[in-house]
Image (cartoon, rainbow, N blue to C red):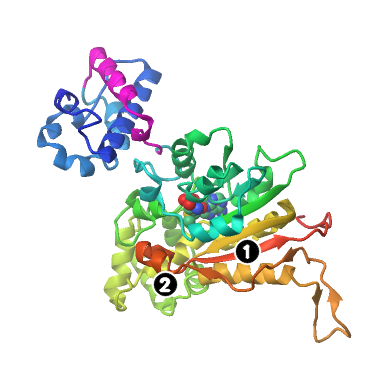
Amino acid sequence: MHSILAHHSPATLPQRVAGLWARAWQSILMQATKKKSPPLAIPFLAGRREEQGTALLPPLFSGLCPQIIGAYSANQLHFTAERISALVNYSTSLPDSFLMAGGGGGGGTAPLPPTSSHYHHPVLADEVDEWMDAQPSDVILDGTLGGGGHTEIFLKKNATVLAIDRDPQAITFATQRLSAFRETLHTFQANYSQMAEHPQLPADGKVDKILLDIGVSSHQIDCAERGFSFQKDGPLDMRMGPNACMSAADFINESSEREILQVLREFGEEPQARRITQLIVERRKKSPFTRTGDLAGTIEQALGRFGKTHAATRTFQAIRMRVNEELTLLQSALEASVALLRPGGRLLVITFHSLEDRLTKQFIQHRAKPFIDDPTWPAPRENPEYFLTLPMRKAISAGSKELSANPRARSAKLRVALRNDRNLPTSYLS
Ligand SMILES: C[S@@+](CC[C@H](N)C(=O)[O-])C[C@H]1O[C@@H](n2cnc3c(N)ncnc32)[C@H](O)[C@@H]1O
């Protein structure tokens, strides 16, 4: 143990490693304090692996907290009270920026990286800044906090931000990263469809502006333990937060053949849906799927690759959308947004998927029509849902500069709508 502590200070350890280091120790120490029962058990940090040098630290630290805590509970190694207090001093001497968020919940416990760009690079940031036009008097609801990149833009303009994310890791990470704005940032772990339940809503229950940046964050995809990636093996999970109704493994192993087929067709728009479904159903008879690598490999083996695209791409996307009920929740969030915005308020929605964009486009275009018509009617009628106006009809996409810096922005589409001053009927959300 002593060799790393003795030979490295925050200044000599790379920041990422130092952050992971500090976070890992904080977890151990918190456990120790709760249990008040030294000697503590600490696995490999106290043992021979530390002698292998700092080159091994990043892989070593990946998933460290759960392993340490697991080994601690199993009482494998002992640690003296003296060493604990040295560690407490060390970890509390680190600057805040070195300390990691994360752990606990959301189906993933991997340590998180220290900067927003590692966590998630906000897409269409300039366009969101321009269209949101945040003012110091604004109360802005960000329904998809993620790493807090967009929220930070609004906070820097002195707006108050009510932020929501269903992923506890995102809430912890962004709250810590944006701690300088603790007076004006109010986070709430929930589905964005529950935005009207945010505990810090103004007295009249209305907000000035809303942002929804739909989908998964880079952190969620990149973190193998979250089970979203077909490129990195991990548990077949894909839950964005603890409120998801099932894991990907539950869906794949327990759903009927018909349901899997329907999900692959509807959410994945997968041309090979029937073949992949049959493959899954045959394979799971032998043993259930538990790992992303297993599912991705089974599909790839049977189908091969389509150019650069992995054969499992659409299947993974479809399962993720089903497990997290993404389209249903988007529809509810759009309805909730219309109810929550003040007259003149703005709604900005960023989507990455054609089904989500179609849903958003149809939702806002329908509500921007004063009159609606039907061939069976003698004349057009007033639209009872005319609550929006559209400053532009087309979606905004990323420019070439952003695309070269952030290829994940290639399918991003931003749509903007303004709330008109018509009152909602009381029946609107019931
Ligand atoms: C694309 S990221 C947002 C990134 C963020 N705008 C930024 O600048 O870092 C999407 C985030 O929305 C969250 N999310 C997805 N569906 C959600 C839902 N139904 N309710 C609340 N949060 C959700 C995800 O957990 C993820 O953190």
81 part of magenta stretch:
yes
For badge 2, the amino acid type reads Thr
| Residue 255 in view | yes
Residue 170 in the figure: left or right of residue 22: right
Mark 2 crowd level (few <14, some 14–19, many ≥20, 10 Å Cα): many
Q: Position of residue 180 (x, y in %)?
A: 49, 34
Quarter of the image with the C terminus in it: bottom right
In this rendering, the label closer to the viewer, 1 or 2: 1
Q: Classify 8 as above or below 398.
A: above
- The range drawn in magenta is 78-102
As helix, strand or loop, the secondary structure at mark 2 comes to helix
| Circle number at residue 277 | 2
What residue is at 62 percent from the left and 48 percent from the top? 141
| Residue 286 in view | no
| Circle number at residue 416 | 1
For badge 1, the amino acid type reads Val
Q: Position of residue 153 (x, y in %)?
A: 52, 48
What residue is at 14 percent from the left and 34 percent from the top? 49
Q: Position of residue 97 (x, y in %)?
A: 37, 34
Give the residue at the far top of this rendering.
Answer: 82
What residue is at 74 percent from the left and 43 percent from the top? 205
Q: CA distance from mark 1 to mark 2?
A: 38 Å
Q: Magenta region, mostly helix, strand or loop? A: helix
Residue 21 in the figure: left or right of residue 324: left
Q: Quadrant of residue 345?
A: bottom right
Q: Position of residue 1 (x, y in %)?
A: 17, 25
